[in-house]
Amino acid sequence: MKCGFVALVGRPNAGKSTLMNALIKDKIAIVSNKPQTTRSEIRGIFNSENSQIIFTDTPGIHKPQHRLGARMNKQATTVLHGVDVVYLVVDGSVPFSSGDAYLLQVIENVKVPVFLILNKMDRVEKEKIIQLLNDWKQRFPFAEYFPISALKQSRFKDLIKTTEKYLPEQEPLYPTDMITDEPENFMLAELIREKVLLATNEEVPHATAVYIENKEFKKNAAYIQAVILVERQGQKGIIIGKNGTMLKRIATLAREDMEQILGRKVYLEIFVRVEEEWRNKDKKITEYGYGFIDE
Ligand SMILES: Nc1nc2c(ncn2[C@@H]2O[C@H](COP(=O)(O)OP(=O)(O)OP(=O)(O)O)[C@@H](O)[C@H]2O)c(=O)[nH]1
Ligand SMILES: [Mg+2]
């Protein structure tokens, strides 16, 4: 059967995580309307009769402001070099910009076929799509061109079929009922971070880290203690909210998702702490699971 690796790279907010989740029909990576949602490489495994495709979602490549951002970029560009196919995921509903031009430079050194995934086509009039594709054809010799909507899941069958053509013939590398190799605690912490991204604005989402401090399974329930870290006292106030209402909302939404994943009742307790400048501390970044040390 066909089995191989596909990397999803692109600018923040292009829809990489939405696309990966939709392709594997499960929620592995968190999604939000804020840029820089994904902070580490995340694997989602697609299994079918004919193939196993190991997708790696990556952080959006951007101009870094902290060590965290620099490491996110490094991870994304490193993933490019260990795969069989690269999907360059572009938000086709916004004009071409310097960020896109930078990405084209990044993929210039890639030795494997690169597909252009022109995403968010549900927002673009049909007549304009051909023009957009022509513009992109002038910019880089992509192996394949796919105008799609990750949200509406258009052209997925065709995308999978075409991708399979570029993968090596070999036995599955992972068990065929496996959809990810992400550690459970990391996925649970990410669910909480997703709710913070949903509920807060400006600097707060970016200054937030989440980790699971303790998890116990007793009878048919899970007892989970988690920590939300922010960089400043004021941000802590925002996360907690008036009379704790914001934190309660975040915890309720996260708990519901956790119950889905764990298939049991969840008792979730969240503590909010301040860790100044954690985004510039390599040791902390690694500890919270946002990637390897960048030597
Ligand atoms: N209209 C529309 N919106 C989409 C589509 N795909 C993704 N989105 C939205 O775009 C936003 C960003 O999606 P993500 O999947 O988090 O984007 P990402 O590329 O993973 O972003 P980072 O992790 O920050 O790099 C979310 O609000 C999605 O719902 C699409 O095909 N159409
Ligand atoms: Mg993402």
Image (tube, grey):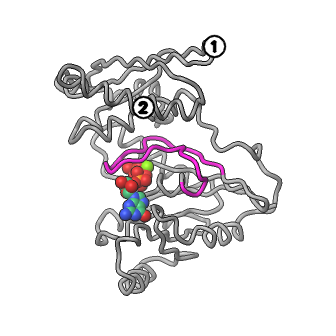
Q: Which class describes the residues within 10 Å of circle 2: few (<14), some (14-19), or many (20+)?
A: many
Split into 4 quadrants, where in the image is the N terminus? bottom right
* Residue ID at (42%, 20%): 226
Please give the range of residues in magenta: 22-45
Q: Position of residue 117 (x, y in %)?
A: 49, 69
Numbered circle sitting on residue 254: 2
In the rendered structure, the answer to whether residue 163 lies left or right of residue 124 reads right
Q: Is the residue indicated by label 1 positioned so its CB lies within 8 Å of ligand 2? A: no
Above or below, 9 against 290 in this view is: below
Residue 49 falls in which quadrant of the image? Answer: bottom right
Identify the mark nearer the N-term, 2 or 1.
1
Q: Is residue 171 left or right of residue 270?
A: right
Q: Residue at x 48, y 57 (%)?
A: 9
Q: Position of residue 208 (x, y in %)?
A: 32, 31
Element assignment for label 1: loop
Q: Amino acid at mark 2?
A: Ala
Could you tell me how far apart the alpha carbons at marks 2 and 1 are, in whole angstroms? 21 Å
Q: Is residue 29 visible?
A: yes
Say which quarter of the image contains residue 70: top left
Q: Is residue 118 above or below residue 25?
A: below
In the image, which is nearer the foreground, mark 2 or mark 1? 1
Q: Quadrant of residue 192?
A: top left
Disc number at residue 4?
Answer: none
Residue 178 on image: x %, y %: 70, 42
**Main SS category, magenta section:** loop
| 266 with respect to 250 (left or right) | right
Residue 21 in the magenta stretch? The answer is no
Residue on which disc 1 sits: 219
Q: Is residue 49 above or below residue 146?
A: above
For label 2, the SS is: helix
